[in-house]
Image (spheres, grey):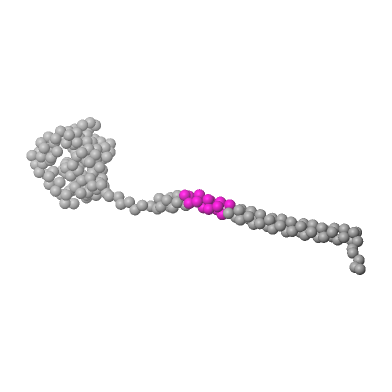
Amino acid sequence: MEKLPSVKALFWAVIAILLVMIFAWITSGITKLRFQSDISTLKTYFRLSSIHHAKDVLMEKKRLPEEKIEVIQSVLEVPLAVEVVPKIVYAGMTLEELGAKLDRSLKSTLSGYGAKFAALSLEYGVDPYVALAIVLHETGCYHGKCSTLTSSCNNVGGLKGSPGCQGGAYKKFATLDEGIEAFIGNLSKNYYQKGLTTVERIGKKYAESKTWTTKVNLYIEKIKAN
């Protein structure tokens, strides 16, 4: 007859089986925890990666306006080719051209004062050709030598007044600039502003000579031709 295991042996066998089962369960739990931990780590990694990527995208979006501003600024800094159209002031000429044309008729003491005559004539509303023609007739400067009244007393239009030039009736001016402006100012105030705007009308009041008008008109033609 076969001998059955003792109660003690069965007890220890059950204990052994339970220990194996507990060990297996513990091992399985640790593996599961490790697996879950790895999953959690991966999720954290991807989450953080996504956050960094999103941050980079946002930063890139923030930089876009700055880049646009830089492009706009660079465009604005490029010099624009602006064509400056010269202003025509008289007879199809600019102020500079008019001054140069008048200067071609001026010699001796008045040489180089064309720009002065041009600027003051336009400022006072006087015809530049008429003003210069009167000066050329009164001073003789067109022929290469100005009169003593001009060279010594800066009087370019035969204006009378004090202080007198060399004690005479004709006025002496401190400088040529002063003498030229006084002449053109007088022509504007006492002639042009009173409707005397042609050589013929000016001559009736300006000079006693009957040939004055003809001679001044001849100088106008010479100025135009130069």
| Residue 15 vertical placement versus 102 (above, below) | below
Given residues 76 and 199, the one toward you in this image is 76
Left or right of 35 in this view: 171: left
> x%, y% of residue 53?
56, 54
Residue at the extreme top: 162
> x%, y% of residue 218?
12, 47
| Residue 173 vertical placement versus 226 (above, below) | above
Left or right of 200 in this view: 74: right
Image quarter of residue 184? top left
Left or right of 79 in this view: 117: left
Given residues 14 and 33, the one toward you in this image is 14
Residue 89, can we see it?
A: yes
> x%, y% of residue 9?
89, 61
Q: Residue at x 38, y 52 (%)?
A: 79
Residue 139, can we see it?
A: no
* Quadrant position of the N terminus in the picture: bottom right
Residue at the extreme front: 1
Q: Is residue 52 magenta?
A: yes
Majority secondary structure of the magenta segment? Answer: helix
Q: Is residue 99 magenta?
A: no
Report the magenta residues as a range. 51-66
Q: Residue at x 61, y 56 (%)?
A: 46
> x%, y% of residue 36?
68, 56
Given residues 38 and 177, the one toward you in this image is 38
Q: Residue at x 22, y 41 (%)?
A: 122
| Residue 9 vertical placement versus 110 (above, below) | below
| Residue 64 vertical placement versus 130 (above, below) | below
Residue at the extreme left: 210
